[in-house]
Amino acid sequence: MADLTVFGTGNMGQAIAGLGSRAGRAVELIGHDDTGTTVSGDLVVLAVPYPAVAEIIEQRRDQFGGRIVVDITNPIDFETFDRLVVPPDSSAAAQIAARLPDSRVLKAFNTTFAGTLAAGTVGPLPTTVLVAGDDGDAKANLVDLVTGAGLRAVDAGPLHRARELEAMAFLQIGLASAGAVPWTGGFGVVA
Amino acid sequence: MADLTVFGTGNMGQAIAGLGSRAGRAVELIGHDDTGTTVSGDLVVLAVPYPAVAEIIEQRRDQFGGRIVVDITNPIDFETFDRLVVPPDSSAAAQIAARLPDSRVLKAFNTTFAGTLAAGTVGPLPTTVLVAGDDGDAKANLVDLVTGAGLRAVDAGPLHRARELEAMAFLQIGLASAGAVPWTGGFGVVA
């Protein structure tokens, strides 16, 4: 039995699984072909690209009931790299929450590059994970994991604030792609 | 004759006028009752709250023709503090640019708290001004002012990226209002 289930074995999935281990949680990492594994963590992180989320939800919706589901995605239009694919008054998190009415959905980790999660720092600053969601206990669970791993966490407000978190991350990814900031840098939080 | 005209004598207007002076520009600061002064700077900064911009444009549109106009506003709904008052697929900068077809409009200074402009630092980081706009020469003019004052400037892309800059600043103001970050801190740029 795991405390934390992470979908996705890419750099973000590995980094978040690493945080869980550092925080003393039992971690389950589920890859793309792992369709037979049943989710056991109370905390589930969907560390896959936004277009891959729909299929996981379709296959696993029953398993996600009652659990905390963390959306880390940035729904960028990779054809134009100039817009998000979700409606402008919505967010990936809102779209995911609408498909998971029996789960407590959080938005987190979308503004922190993988390298900054692994290092624990963004330049001279501690890496800070911004967490949005409507359920206080769910947020406290994730904040405890993040701080237990030695990083900082800040409550960014209700789940609909995911719209601003995704906008900020889109901007940050654009700056990194343009070479204006390194993938080990970007936006830090001075608290 | 001024090089830089700043509308607004609040903390942002004063801080931006201060940057102009430090960068060696001749600065003109226009307050609310200064209706008789004719704009002389090639670079005009509207350092007033978003609701006050419309009246200035109405009164001064002819004077702004051919000039660079910098929008620094964050169009927050101050009744709910939970949304922006501009359409979700637009921005304050886009609204202002639509009213000033003969000006070159930039978005800047909306993600930097006044205290960080005056200090030149956000915690351990140099204060970084994110600048969006569609005219390269206009951006270069403003970047030159910012760097001439000892701060950093980063090109954030075309003017329609103001939507993300305003979302990021809305989030930052919410965090400061909630006490999660100080008004001398917030989001820094690790470049």
Image: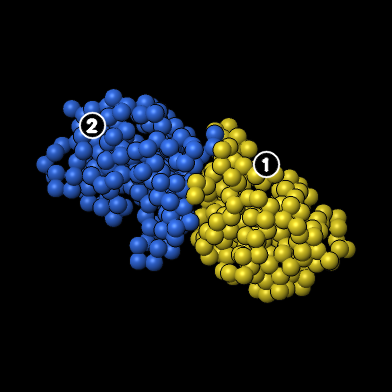
Chain colours: A yellow, B blue
Which residue is found at the position 76% from the left and 54% from the top? A21
Residue A17 place in picture, x, y as percent = 75, 53
Q: Nearer the viewer, residue A8 or B59?
A: A8
Write down the residue under mark 2.
B27
Horizontal placement of B54 versus B128: left or right?
left
Q: Distance from label 1 to label 2 (Cα)? A: 44 Å
Q: Is residue B64 visible?
A: no
User: A56 above or below A151?
Assistant: below
Amino acid type, residue under disc 1 in the picture = Ala
Q: Secondary structure at mark 2?
A: strand
User: B190 above or below A106?
Assistant: above
Amino acid type, residue under disc 2 in the picture = Val
Q: Residue furthest left?
A: B36
Parent chain of label 2: B
Which residue is found at the position 22% from the left and 47% from the top? B56
Pointer 1 local density, CA inside 10 Å: few below 14, some 14–19, many at least 20:
some
Q: How many marks?
A: 2
Q: Secondary structure at mark 1?
A: helix
